[in-house]
Image (cartoon, rainbow, N blue to C red):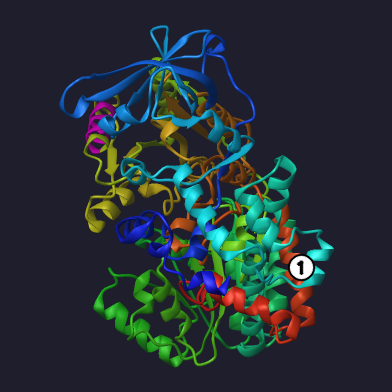
Amino acid sequence: MDALRKIDIKYIKGIGPQRAELLEKELGLRSAYDLVHHFPNTYIDRSNFYKISDFHGEMPSVMIRGRFISFTIQGEGAKTRLVGLFTDGTSNIEVIWFQKIQQLKTAYRPMVDYVLFGKPQEFRGSWSMVHPEVDTIEHAATMQGLRGVYPMTEKLRNRGITSRIIYGWVQNVLNVAGRVFSDPLPPQVIEKHHLMPLTQAIHSIHNPANLQEMQAAQLRLKFEELFYIQVDMLRRTRKRKSVLVGLRFPKIGDWFNRFYRECLPFELTNAQKRVVKEIRADVNTGRQMNRLVQGDVGSGKTLVALLSMLIALDNGAQACLMAPTEILAQQHYETISKLVAPIGVNVKLLTGSTRKKARTQIHEQLMDGSLQILIGTHAVIEDNVEFKNLGFVVIDEQHRFGVEQRAKLWRKSEIPPHVLVMTATPIPRTLAMTVYGDLDVSVIDELPPGRKPVTTVMRYDEQREALYQFVYKQLELGRQIYIVYPLIEESEKTDLLSLQEGYEMICQTFPNHKVAFVHGRMKPAEKDFQMGLFARHEADLLVATTVIEVGVNVPNASVMIIENAERFGLSQLHQLRGRVGRGADQSFCVLMTKYKLAKETKERLHLMTQTTDGFVIAEADMKMRGPGDIEGTMQSGLPFELHIANLATDGQIIQMARDTAEQLLDLDPDLQLPQHQPLARAIAQTLVRTRDWSRIS
């Protein structure tokens, strides 16, 4: 394998400099190693021939055998095309090419037997096939069985590069490389899990003899990819825990105990108690804590964070909470300062809007230690913000912050502070084990007593009048209403127009009620002003885009209307729904859609009406959309590349890889044993890392 890494892809027969440049740009392929690790993402069975007369409905790609009757060139300019009339003796089909017209016209001859492979399309009772693979009978015989379909881009197709051509290049590499690749997996790992040897797996993934061989090759290669990630991540985590000294907080004192006895607003759920115990154990080890707490909106993460900060106070340290927006920081400040006011904890708020006099006082109190809890936005990481003894850091919705921003806060203490990361975006377990595999993960999977689940319904545009009657009744009860439009990309002018029209329609429909209006292209000050109107109940309705997904806590809001709900992912819909149901009153989420929807879309939205469990929704969302689209993972960037494994569907393999990695590192923490040296080299060469993620989350 090492030798293949050194072979530039342009030297592979059939590629050359121009195609090499295109392959690197479109698929990231630079070497012969990259090419043989460009695995098929699906397979087509070319074992059976179909008859044209049996075609019906939506057909898959099929293989037919017959002859061309005639060829004609039709159309002009960009619409010029070569049309071949093909028959298999049962019926006829038109075969159409838009490129290399003259070359193909002379390459294929009438009344000669050919085999076609492609996807039939029906139009007005006639069948056609665009750009199929065309083979002689003799060559087609060598192509039967399972054929891999390689990941492609539209630009590659337009330049005449097909899946079949990529397959040919892969075969060129495999023929030159020979039959033996050194296997980096330790023999005991291969034997334990009955894995296919690497040489066989590489050849079988590109040339499977049957379904069973293909699946065995996939298992081997998926396991290897995920095993590398788990070994690497666990090794870094273990090293951090062994090397990085942390403040030790052995004491539970007056601040914690008095708050627990005198100020606790409600009995903690069992999930909250469990997470607090996990945090208490972490901060008493003398090693830096690095823990992710995830839980649905309203599950009580902030209370857990406050109890944890009070433990820091009991041990003479200061605490800091950083939130992504000014309005969210303000709400955290109001909640926490109100809760701890009876016991006299000094809490201050620092944001971009903090006036100079207050800012000076905050700086002085941080330095003399009298300011115990600082809550703020990015303002808390400014260079002139210094602490006397920062011991505990809480980062809310951490994916909203950049790597360097989090690292700045982390470095504000000589001994690294304990870090608690909170997210209201439920993360599927398989994703958490990989993206956040270097963090200890806690889950709050219960809602506090008294919270009523939000009732979610689907409604169509034709039912809008009845919906507005319902909204009127809610407004008469003194409730507030969110109406969200799908301005997903802030540059979409049509969406912005739709949002403006929606705002004007709501103003006309509810003339006696104040309507606030928020979208991402507003200046921050104007956005905060409009959100503030709604938060203070100076506005009854808020027309907005997804900018309100995180950062608005209005317990009086009881209705969330999501326009064009079919354009949102499940996790995003769940986050928006979490804006209501925060008070004691029954709340509602209305998913507005057009009547005609694709089957998959209907199933997705129907799931929203059936469950309010964010983890169930996150798992379903990842399976439908893939892990890269889950809220938070794209913003933070995956610290590795996956070529064949799928975080959405390979959960069992991920767990198997993690367990095996744990056992291996227990035996050989630094991979120094001779039998583990090939594994160490393979991990170093294979994983594409962006940064050392274990030290900054």
Judge whether residue 491 is colored magenta. Answer: no
Q: Is residue 673 visible?
A: yes
Horizontal side of residue 597 vs 670, given as left or right: left
Name the image quarter holding the N terminus. bottom right
Q: How many marks?
A: 1
Q: Position of residue 257 (x, y in %)?
A: 69, 75
In this view, the residue in front, 5 or 343, is 5
Quarter of the image for residue 258 reads bottom right
Q: What residue range appears in magenta? A: 496-506
Q: Residue at x 63, y 51 (%)?
A: 205
How crowded pointer 1 is (Cα within 10 Å; few <14, some 14-19, many 20+) is rated as: some
Q: Is residue 222 visible?
A: no
Hey, what amino acid is under mark 1?
Thr
Residue extending farthest to the left is 77
Q: Secondary structure at mark 1?
A: helix
Quadrant of residue 673 within the rendered picture:
bottom right
Q: Eyeballing the image, is 179 above or below 26?
A: below
Q: Position of residue 343 (x, y in %)?
A: 57, 74
Looking at the image, is 216 positioned above or below residue 114? below
Overall secondary structure of the magenta stretch? helix
Looking at the image, residue 42 sits to the left or right of residue 594; the answer is right
Q: Residue at x 63, y 71 (%)?
A: 259
Taking 500 as reference, is 202 above or below it? below
Q: Nearer the viewer, residue 384 or 93?
A: 93
Please state the horizontal and vertical placement of residue 209, each as a whole percent of the image. Answer: 69, 43
> Does residue 688 appear left or right of residue 536 in this picture?
right
Tell me if 542 is positioned left or right of 606 in this view. left
Return the x and y of residue 402 as percentages of the image width and height: 40, 69
Q: Nearer the viewer, residue 570 or 130?
A: 130
Query: What residue does disc 1 label?
Result: 660
